[in-house]
């Protein structure tokens, strides 16, 4: 009997992981009809069908084309059709028109997935999977996991836009607590901290290079801001007091007619919010969600606090077990913090992405990945803000303490929420 | 044996016609997938699914609600969802968001159609169908036929927008002639002419009242303008010479970057046009199609002619047999004029809607239909232009010499073309 | 002693008229500061300075360049800078940027006027002024008179936009009547009527050719609609009832937040309107002014009437003495109809331009003037509406029964008002 | 003889400084006509007249109203009319309509200035000028100096927009050098650096609190990037290569049709740029100017370098004499670096504002000034970028090493340029 080499073992593990991640995507789309998968409800969001195809395009373009000799494209025209924003790969179908493609059909996209999956599996079952190939596959899987989350946030927007209020899934776990755990503060001293990926395991280029940052003394809140607390802000005139807002944020409030987070509606005096199981009354202890950076910042100012920097967040998250309300839990909605508190801040991972006070810029010495994949993160390092910690729609294996998500300040359709911080000596 | 009363006979005929028209709509949508039927490619156009539902809503709202005692709505929320523009009926789902409704599904819309069809049939099978009910059903059927045409023009836009260039139908009849019939002029003298519907049979309110118009002497072209003639205009700098255009038309040319009719593309030096069977090389003798009023007007000026008024058109069409290239012929594209010429102008009916020089306004003494149905035509009597004669996508039974179609000057996605006219003594 | 030839006499008269018209323009601008003359308050309007320069450019381009041998341009760059929309003359400075030109200064523009005036006078004092030259000068003077009116309407918009509410002129004649003359109807029978300029004296090309029109029987109101009547429309929910409006008009109401005519404001419960002498309380018997076609049409529908066609208006105006509240009267605001009624409708000339139900299109056989001047009217014959009769800002000598003014339906900054008409037998 | 108290001396000095700064503003506006002072050429810029009035409003609102008992406003309506963006003070005249106010006239605004100046002088000549009053006056003067620079940048935009190409001043000092000084690198080690205002003398709240920052090792360029170097970037396809640009920057290039810095034009093959003395051929050794953050960032990437952070810039500027090409020098345009090099980087102060890689956010522990003046800087701390060092339009006394200017990434109409930096070990 032939003993597998270590490379073979690694390749086998990668092939297994490939299957698992790709299957997870398929399962996420399973409750949706072809019509659901067709719709693009705003330029920022994409149709489910597009997500299914684009993630496949990613493997075709960055794994099969360079590595799979003799690979034949499923359809050469998909190279343009499902390119998101890689100028180095070539032209792209216009982003706001992703919802106008009834063809290829959902069935054809599934066939496209099967075609590419077979070719990738075939590649990974060979004896020699070199480091470059393994890295490209690994990046493709992390990329796929990002789109798994987007499938959920984008279809939530599609369904919530529909006056019939359809649900993605009928039953969601009920929120346990009605009253939130008391909010406490976890203080830290000034220190030079190592920030960024330390090596070992996957990381995106924007998590590197690891570098030293002087973090001032301060404190982090023990849990996320709740819907109940956010309602207090609203009742105190939060959306009507310009002094609480950054100037552009105040412009957004007025231009958008904002008076509550996205998906909130008042029904006969009761505040409700759309969830992936349809509209539900708000839970007072449930973390507030679907707020923009503008709202997170204004709430923090109203509360006499501020948003954490990404550095003090990462410092606090380092060493914390990556556990929490992720997509695997099936809640698909943030949940109240558990009453029994651990030694550090709770809810650091899962539930909602936490807006930070940090603009998304490159770390000192940052170099994007070479080639087309250098467009993955680096070219977006302006006018966006870092979010940390993952959400109830994120796969658990996808996040880590050094992970940097980023969105523009007005974005509200992600599962984005608020953790407060404050300066030392307050 | 009981003899049917005349009313019963009429009702039976109406029920038969109801079934025939409704079935024709179903057949038009048959080649389309649920995804095709979902898409709204621009605010002016609507998804096929919306057309299927809205025409059904029309019968539910204007036939069943007033006349069918005990009728239960299929879904009360559809009253808003599928209301197009009837303010008197109530609120409307925003027009540009018709494509964002994955629910109800196509299957549910089909069930909606069946539900309403059953109730209407039931109503028509009673002994007494009064005049008001018969009129409402008749209007609903004419309305349905208009949407049959829109299903074709709108899906053509959807498919032509797709870079994969899918076809609605694979085989279309080939254009017979390569060289067009020679263009001749049919002159008429000044005369007072009766214009508008004379009674007997259905007509829209905008075709009334019949009234006297003094039509000056002039002449109409013996056939439609062809693609070959339009190419000459293009080669002569038609799209680059402001002196040929109305001022707003010239603005449209520059703002839209227009240099050819909608759907025309040059492939390796050959001009092609999208058809419902996919892209095809232009036929020189085929009537030009998918031009705006601006282009029709500019072409006519370039040709030393003008567009006909709707009055001289109607005068020439009166008494002409309503025959031609309608939707029933299955060409779904304009066809060259037959070489053998009749006594009057050819191609008056079918092929393409003919832009006239007449702004769409009410006839002297015009009164809209009472009630919500008064919004059908009257409120659009400004800044639109009359088109006459029907097209290759129009049901033959739907048009007549007095029929007034209308669209804004920039509209190009209808099967709209050009017939020339000229003044007397030129 | 040498007797002047008839041509000399005509030329002398033309020179005198030239001086008189040009001087009238100067007088209109006299109360304004250089800063006032600089401002363009919206793209539709132009700065006074621009009007002063453009009318001069018109003589330079269409009189001096073709006819004055050896004429040297004041500044060659003005050819582009002050070209309004004549593509045949060449490029144009972008219309919305007319207010961004601090140079040439107002003083320099006055010098430009003097330069051109001297050259034109010189030309007209020669013995031989041929018909083409005389026609070009005459057209230039009529053009200048149109801009005299625009100077007043445009500066009214500038001043009314200023929160300080400055006035063009401090004292305006007070409106005499508080209660309007009773409204009566002047009926007419069906008849074939000669419409358009009959020759003899100046007319614009859009008033030709004279042609026969069959005018149906109907009736015209004896006077203009008053502010008091318009207030009744408002109090009856006029701006909140979609059934009263054309579809595009209703869109304009909502998009613009319209709830009253332009320049109307409610101050402590009293309705006031900006005038060229500052804001004043409304006079109930004063003709309503600064309404769009949409509002004129909606008011007429509310009143159970309609707007007149341009043909029945011209028929009624033919033979009526051209007298009324013109710019020479100095009111610069419409005035109540005189109580003593004449044999026909009153206020046909002056006070306010009367919106008609007639889209602005060419008369049968219309041919624009040859050359660049053909752009004067012809290219605007789409999506505009004919107004008749002149206003309180129009020079008396400028109007006539066949005169066709035209503006797009949403325009409100002209002195535009409403006369009702109705069908026979109502 | 009475000896002045120290407070009196300080007040006398403040009064003298008040006169000097206010007079400098007047002198800057002196070459401009009332028409020049009227124009707002884009929403970002303001008319000179508005600057003259708003700076006066600032003293009226923040100095006279709280401190001058019995002060009577020049015109109460100016409180709204000349409020820029202080929500706590009340309503504001809409920013894009600042150019629509012909009244108050320039003369009236000058009278307004005199009225307020007299009241402020009167206040400062009293015996007791307390610290709060002195601080408010001082802030008003620094504010006035900011608007002195804006008067120049905004009128430059007005004049450059005019096709006649008028000049603010006819003679500007010629650029001496044709070839730039060689570019060298000044390296620095990693260090914890004190950043922000240390107390003593005026600073804006955004320069505080002084705090510790860990600055990584790196190097700064010895001088500014020149026009010659920027032309190389252009000739190397700089504006056509997406890989050089941030994603939003590339969007700006395409949407704006950018192919060179603002104000650059090619005339017969020679590149010229608008200056305040009219259009001039480019000087190869002159610092490039009027580039956006997008362009500065793209150029740096093309050059294999990066922009400096504001922290390494401040570290290098600390202790450097504040000398250079400021507004007092009268060049009103950047000048080549002097060939003889000092020990550190040259051109740190004056010439052009240097875009940094640092987003404009609050320093750790930042607290805005209390009250309405807290809106001065704090509410703009999002989606803008820090610029450092002052420009040829900045008063020398206005800048310092800790000074933080800020503009959005697309802004090009300021005197903004580029200094390169690089990481250690390259």
Image (cartoon, coloured by chain):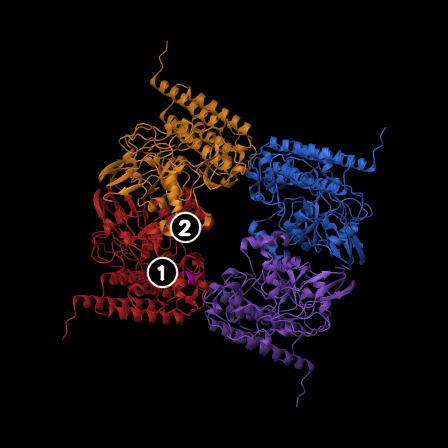
Chain colours: A purple, B red, C orange, D blue
Magenta segment: B155-161
Return the residue nearer the eye: C54 or B257. Answer: C54
Residue placed under numbered mark 2 in the picture: C240
Residue placed under numbered mark 1 in the picture: B150
Disc on res. D235: none
Same chain for marks 2 and 1? no
Magenta-span inclusion, residue C263: no
Q: Position of residue D315 (x, y in %)?
A: 79, 52
Q: Residue furthest top?
A: C1
Q: In the picture, which quadrant includes the N terminus of chain C?
A: top left
Q: Position of residue A67 (x, y in %)?
A: 61, 72
Q: Residue furthest bottom?
A: A1
Query: Disc 2 is attached to a residue of which chain?
Result: C
Return the residue nearer the eye: B18 or D82. Answer: D82
Q: Is residue B305 visible?
A: yes
Packing grade of label 2 (10 A; few <14, some 14-19, many >=20) is some
Separation of marks 2 and 1 at Cα, in angstroms: 32 Å
Secondary structure under the numbered disc 1 in the rendered image = helix
Q: Can you say whether B300 is above or below D70 in the image? A: below
Return the residue nearer the eye: C272 or B23. Answer: C272
Q: Main secondary structure of the magenta part?
A: helix
Tell me how many marks there are. Answer: 2
Q: Position of residue C83 (x, y in %)?
A: 47, 35
Secondary structure under the numbered disc 2 in the rendered image = helix
Q: Can you say whether C242 is above or below A367 in the image? A: above
Magenta-span inclusion, residue B156: yes
Q: Nearer the viewer, mark 2 or mark 1?
A: 2
Query: Disc 1 is attached to a residue of which chain?
Result: B
Q: Can you say whether A121 is above or below C377 in the image? A: below
User: With B233 as the anchor, is A135 left or right in this view?
Assistant: right
């Amino acid at each position: 009997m032939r003993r597998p080499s270590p490379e073979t073992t690694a390749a086998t593990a990668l092939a297994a992981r490939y299957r698992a991640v790709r299957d997870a995507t398929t399962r996420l789309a399973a409750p949706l009809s072809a019509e659901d998968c067709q719709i693009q409800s705003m330029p920022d969001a994409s149709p489910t069908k597009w997500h299914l195809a684009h993630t496949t395009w990613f493997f075709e373009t960055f794994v099969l084309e360079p590595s799979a000799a003799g690979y034949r494209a499923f359809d050469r025209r998909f190279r343009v059709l499902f390119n998101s924003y890689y100028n180095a790969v070539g032209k792209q179908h216009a982003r706001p028109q992703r919802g106008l493609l009834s063809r290829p059909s959902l069935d054809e996209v599934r066939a496209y997935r099967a075609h590419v999956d077979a070719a990738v599996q075939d590649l990974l079952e060979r004896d020699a999977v070199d480091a470059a190939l393994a890295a490209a596959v690994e990046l493709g899987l992390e990329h796929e996991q990002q789109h798994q989350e987007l499938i959920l946030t984008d279809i939530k927007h599609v369904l919530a836009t529909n006056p019939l209020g359809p649900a993605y899934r009928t039953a969601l776990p009920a929120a346990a607590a009605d009253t939130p755990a008391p909010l406490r503060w976890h203080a830290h001293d000034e220190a030079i901290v190592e920030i960024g990926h330390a090596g070992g395991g996957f990381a995106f280029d924007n998590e590197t290079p690891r570098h030293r940052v002087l973090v001032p003394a301060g404190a982090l809140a023990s849990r996320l801001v709740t819907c109940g607390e956010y309602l207090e802000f609203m009742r105190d005139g939060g959306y009507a007091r310009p002094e609480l807002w950054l100037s552009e944020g105040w412009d957004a409030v007025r231009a958008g007619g904002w008076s509550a987070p996205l998906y909130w509606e008042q029904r006969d005096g009761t505040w409700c919010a759309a969830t992936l199981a349809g509209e539900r009354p708000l839970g007072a202890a449930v973390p507030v969600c679907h707020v923009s950076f503008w709202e997170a910042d204004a709430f923090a100012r109203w509360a006499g606090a501020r948003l954490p920097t990404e550095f003090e967040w990462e410092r606090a998250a380092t060493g914390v077990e990556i556990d929490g309300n992720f997509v695997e839990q099936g809640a698909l909605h943030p949940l109240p913090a558990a009453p029994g508190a651990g030694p550090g801040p709770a809810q650091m991972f899962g539930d909602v992405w936490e807006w930070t006070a940090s603009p998304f810029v490159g770390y000192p010495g940052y170099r994007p990945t070479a080639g087309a994949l250098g467009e993955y993160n680096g070219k977006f390092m302006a006018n966006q803000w870092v979010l940390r910690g993952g959400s109830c729609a994120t796969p658990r294996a996808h996040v880590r303490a050094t992970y940097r998500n980023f969105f523009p300040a007005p974005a509200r359709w992600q599962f984005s929420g608020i953790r407060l911080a404050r300066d030392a000596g307050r």
